[in-house]
Image (spheres, grey):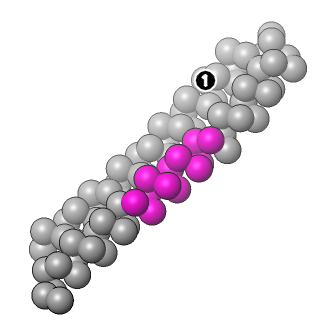
Amino acid sequence: MEPTSLAFLGAGLGAGLVALGAGLGIGRLAGPAMEGSARQPEAAGDIRNSMIVAAALIEGVAFFGLIICLLLALK
């Protein structure tokens, strides 16, 4: 295998792991948030705002990881 193909393989695996981690993280965040909103409907607005901020941070880290994988592949 050429070094270029190995770089693409590594970048693809890295991007897949980043997407998997982001999906699991948001899933672990959204489930308890929905449960908390169902148990205390008066706190749903605060829970939703906290969940959106945390999901945005998770997505930001996932996007950063994806960009790093692409930069490594195109190097």
Identify the residue shown where x is 62% and y is 41%. Answer: 27
Identify the residue shown where x is 59% and y is 50%. Answer: 24
Task: Point out residue 67 in the picture as x, y percentages from the top left corner.
Answer: 27, 57
Main SS of the magenta part reads helix
Q: Quadrant of the N terminus?
A: bottom left
Q: Which residue is mark 1?
A: 49
Q: Quadrant of residue 28?
A: top right
Amino acid marked by disc 1: Asn
| Left-right relation of 17 to 2 | right
Identify the residue shown where x is 30% and y is 65%. Answer: 12
Q: Quadrant of residue 15?
A: bottom left
Is 19 above or below relative to 27? below
* Magenta-drawn stretch contains 19: yes
Task: Point out residue 64 in the picture as x, y percentages from the top left corner.
Answer: 34, 55
* Magenta-drawn stretch contains 62: no
Identify the residue shown where x is 73% and y is 26%. Answer: 34
| Left-right relation of 41 to 30 | right
Q: Which residues are magenta?
A: 16-27
